[in-house]
Image (cartoon, grey):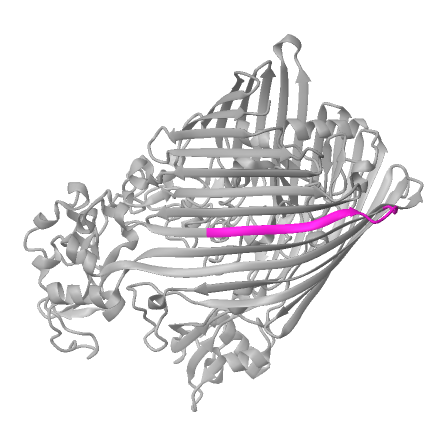
Amino acid sequence: MTEQLRNGFKPSSLSLALAGALMMSGGAALAQDAEGTQPGATTLDHVTVTGSLIPQTQVETFTPVTVISAEDIQMRGFESVADVLQQSSFTTGGLQGGQTSASFTQGAEAAGLFSLDPGYTKYLINGRPMANYPALYNGSDTFNNISGIPVAMVERIEILPGGQSSLYGSDAIAGVVNIILKKRLDGAEMSVRGGAFSEGGGSSVRFTLADSFTSADDRLTVLAGVQAESRKPIWGHQRDLTSQYNTNGYSTPFASRDFLVSDAIAGTYHFMDPNNCANTVGQFGGTTGLQNRPGYGQYCGSFVSPGQRTIRNGKDSVQGYSYATFDLNGTTSLYGELMLNYEETEYATGSSYTWWGTGAKYGAFYDPDLGRLVNLQRAFAPEDIGGQGYKDILNTDRNKAYSLAFGMQGILGDSAWDYDIGAMRTEYKLTERGWARWADPIDAYFRENVLGPQLGVDPDYNFYPVFRPDYANFYSPIAPQDFAGFTGYTTTESRTWNNMLRAQFTNASLFGLPGGDAGFAIVAEAGNEGWEYNPDPRLIEDPDTLESQVWGTTSVSGGGHRSRYAVTSELRLPLLDPLTVTLSGRYDAFDIAGQTVDKPTYSLGVEYRPVESLLLRGKYGTAFRAPTLSDTFQGLSGYYGRLPDYYRCSLDGYDPANVEGCAYENAQYFGQQSGNPDLESIEADVWNAGVVWAPTSNFSLAVDYYSWDIENEVDQLSGDQLLRTEYLCRTGAAGNQVTSCDNALAWVGRGPNGELQSLYTPKVNVAKQKLEAVTASLNYMVDVGAWGSLAFAANYTNNLEHTIRPTPEDAEIDLLRDPYYMWIYDAYAKTRTDASVAWSKDRWTTTLYANRIGETPNYLAYAGGSYDYVHSSGARAGKWDAYTTYNASVNYRATDNLQLSLMVNNLSNEMPDDQSADYPGTSSTPYNNYYYNPYGRAVYMEMKYSFGK
C-alpha cells in the first residue's frame, strides 16, 4: 500500500537472473525486509531489494548482498543461524564459543566477517539492531550472541560485506547481517526435527509451530510462532581426538599431572607417595597410575582426563515470535513485532580447570625433609566429585531476551512521500551459574588433611611458609562429601538494553532525470542504551590482596549507559539510463560519561550498465565504531608486575633499546587497568568495486573487491608501552607515543625518590589495521527436461592483504603470512568457499553442499614463529591442507501438506585428526578448536506439515 508497492517494474535479463538466484540459492542479490524500519525495501515482481533507503527497480546496485533463503538453510542442513553464518565463505577467522573450553563466552555463539572481530559486524533482526550480549567476547569486547534466533522462523539472511556506517551507523565496519523473519504464512505450519552424531553425543530435537491469519476485511494480519529445542552436549571422551592426551604428536605423550609435587626452583618433580600411586588407581575410571616424564620425574596421572569436558554445549531453548499489521485506511497501517528468547546452555571446562595447588596462595612452601621449595598440584577426578562426576558440576548460562517494536507507516496524503515512524526496545539478561572452589574452605581442607600446621618460614629467603605434608593423604581420593564442602556455585547477573525512536521519510520520485526518477530519503533516530555486569560478590578481588573468595578466579564489574541520536540521508540520482550515482551521509552522536563522541560518515556509490546484462559498480565511504559501553565503563582491576623502568635507566646512560645490566631493568610495580571514558571512535576508510554479469535469465556471476583502512582501534594499554611513552615525554626524545604526555605522566606513579610504584593501563585508541579482499559468487539454473531442474551456486572469499600495527611504534604485522600472529589474531584462512548443487523433480528435491576452508598455518608454524621452523623431532612447520566438508539432503513432498526430509551433515565424517601430528604429546586439544571441530557426521530427519495447503 506504500509507494514502493505501487511502482511498476520492467525486468531486465540482469534483474531476472538475479531474482532467480534469490529464489533458488544464496547468490549475490540485494534484499531487505519490506516491512522493517531500517533501510528500505522494494517488492518488484516478487523480488525484494535492499542496501538502500530508497525503493529501486534493480535487483543489483552498487552494494553487493549475499542472500541465504529459508530453503537454503533447510536443504543445506544448517542447524541454526549461528551455523549458517559460521559456515559462510566470509568467515575466514577463528571464533570463541562452545568448542573453546574456559573461554570468556563459552555459552554464546559468535560470527565475524573477513577475520575481523565479531564486534565489527552490525547484526539486525528485521532491520532493527540486535541486543548486545552482556558478557564480553575474549573478556573485553562487546558482541552479539546469535544463538537465540528461531531458525525455523527465518525467511532469509542477508549479508552486506564492507563498511556500511553511512546507512547503519556504528559497528558496521566489516559489514551488516540482517536476519529477516517470516511475516505471513498461508496457514498453520508444524515441523519436528531430530538427529544425532554418528560418533555419539549432541543429539537434538526441535519443534516449531507457527500460524498466520487475516481478518475477514483483510485489514488485520497476525503471525505467531514458537520454537523449542533441546540438545545434549558433546563430551571430549566421545571423540578419539579429544578423549586423551595426544598420541599422534611429534613428542612422547604424557599423562596429566593429577597428583604432583614439583620443585619450585628447578621445575623437576619429587615423587613422595609411599604407596606408589596405589591409592589413586580408581581415579578417572581406573586409568590413573604411576607415570614418568624423562628429565622431570614421577607422578600419578591419567591419559584420559581431557575427556571430562564438553566440546559442544548442551542447550534447552524456547523462542516466541509474533508480527502483526493493521490497515487504518488505504494509505496508513500500524505494525508491531515481539520476539522472546529463553535459553539455557550448559558446559564443563574439564579437569584442566578443576584442580587445587599451593602456588596460588603461597607461591611455594618449604619442605624440611626435602630441603627444597616445592608446590603441590591436585586435579579432581569424577570419583572425587561423586554421582555423575563432571555432569554434576556443569556451568549454566541462562539467557532471557526480548525485542519489541511498533510503529506506523504509510503515504503522506496524495504526495509521493512515504513515512515510517516507530519505536523499539530490546533487553538481554544473562545469568551465569559457574562452578567454583571456595578459597578459604579448599585451602583449609588441604591444610588440615595434607599440609599440616605451618612450622615457620624457609631458611633461605625467610619468606615462604614451612610445611611437613602428609603425602599419603595427598596421594589419596577425596570423599565426595568433602569435595562438596569446599565447592559450590557463583551467580553473576548482567544485562544490556537499547531503546530507539526512528522516523523515515522517503520519496522515490523526487524529480526526473534522464535515467529516471531521483529518489531521496531522510531518517532521524534517537535513543539510549545501557550495560551492566554484576559478578557474584565473592568473585570480586580484594584491592589489597588481589584475591577473591573463589579459588583461582576473579571477575570485574562494570556498567554504564549512553544516549545517542543520528540523522541519515540518501540521494539516488539516475543521471543517465546506464549511470546511477547514490550519495548517503549520516551523523551519529553519543553522550557518554558527560562527554559527546560524534562521527559523520558518508558514501558515494556508482552503478554503470553499459549493456543490459552487465553491471559495473563501486562505492567509497567511511565507517566507524563508537566506544562501546564495556570499553568505556569496564571496572578497575589490579595486578602486580615487573618491567624495565626506561626513564630511570636513561638517567644512568642506558638506551631503551638495550637496558640489560640496568639496576632498574626489572622494577616491580602495582598495576591497575580499566575502561576509559576518554576513548575516541574507531574509524575506517572503505571502498569496493565489482562487476555483475548476467547474460541470460538463469546465469549470474559477480566479482567484488573490498578495501578497509582502519585506525584508532581500541586495545588495553600495556605497562611496557606506557613506560616507553613516559620516557619519551620526560626526556624529549623522538619516538611514537601511545598516549598523551599528560596521560603518561599521570598514569605512571613514582615515589619521593623517583622509584616506580604504580601503573594505570586503561584501554586506549592505539592500533591500525588494513584489509583487502575479493569475493565471487555464481548462480546457474538449468532445466534438464524430464529429468527435472538443476541449480548451481558458489561463493568464494580471498583475503588478499591483511596487516595490523598494534601500536604506532610497532612494525606492521602480516596476518596472512606470519603464522604466529595469524594464530594470535585468529586470522587463519586466506580463502574460503562454499558451493551447492540442487536437483528438483516432481515431489523430490536433493542438495549437495560443500564448504571448503583453504590452507591454514599448522601449530608448529605458530609455536616456532615461522614456516621454516623444524622441531628437534624432525616435525616441520607448514600449512594444513584445505579442509572440505559435505552436507547432503533429500526432501520428499509426500502430500501437498506433508514434507519429509533427511539431512546428513559432514557426509564423509571429516574431522581434523591429521592436525594432531603437528602438536606435542602433552596437548589435550591437538587441533585448532577456534576454526575446526571434531563433531563428525550428523544425521537429521524432519517432518513439516502445512495445515493451510
Q: Position of residue 192 (x, y in %)?
A: 46, 29
User: Looking at this rendering, what residue extends furthest in the top direction?
Assistant: 786
Q: Nearer the viewer, residue 503 or 788?
A: 503
**Horizontally, is 1 left or right of 37 in the view?**
right
406 falls in the magenta region: yes
Q: Position of residue 153 (x, y in %)?
A: 56, 37
Q: Nearer the viewer, residue 494 or 439?
A: 494
| Stretch in magenta | 400-416
Q: Position of residue 575 (x, y in %)?
A: 90, 44
Figure disc tally: 0
Q: Is residue 653 visible?
A: no
Q: Nearer the viewer, residue 196 or 163?
A: 196
679 falls in the magenta region: no
Relative height, residue 174 to residue 598 (above, below): above
Relative height, residue 731 to residue 783 (above, below): below
The quarter of the image holding the C terminus is top right
**Horizontally, is 124 left or right of 236 in the view?**
right
Residue 756: quarter of image: bottom left
**Horizontally, is 312 left or right of 739 in the view?**
left
The quarter of the image holding the N terminus is top right
Q: Nearer the viewer, residue 101 or 204?
A: 204
Residue 454: quarter of image: bottom left
Q: Tell me what residue is drawn at x 32 percent, y 69 percent.
A: 548
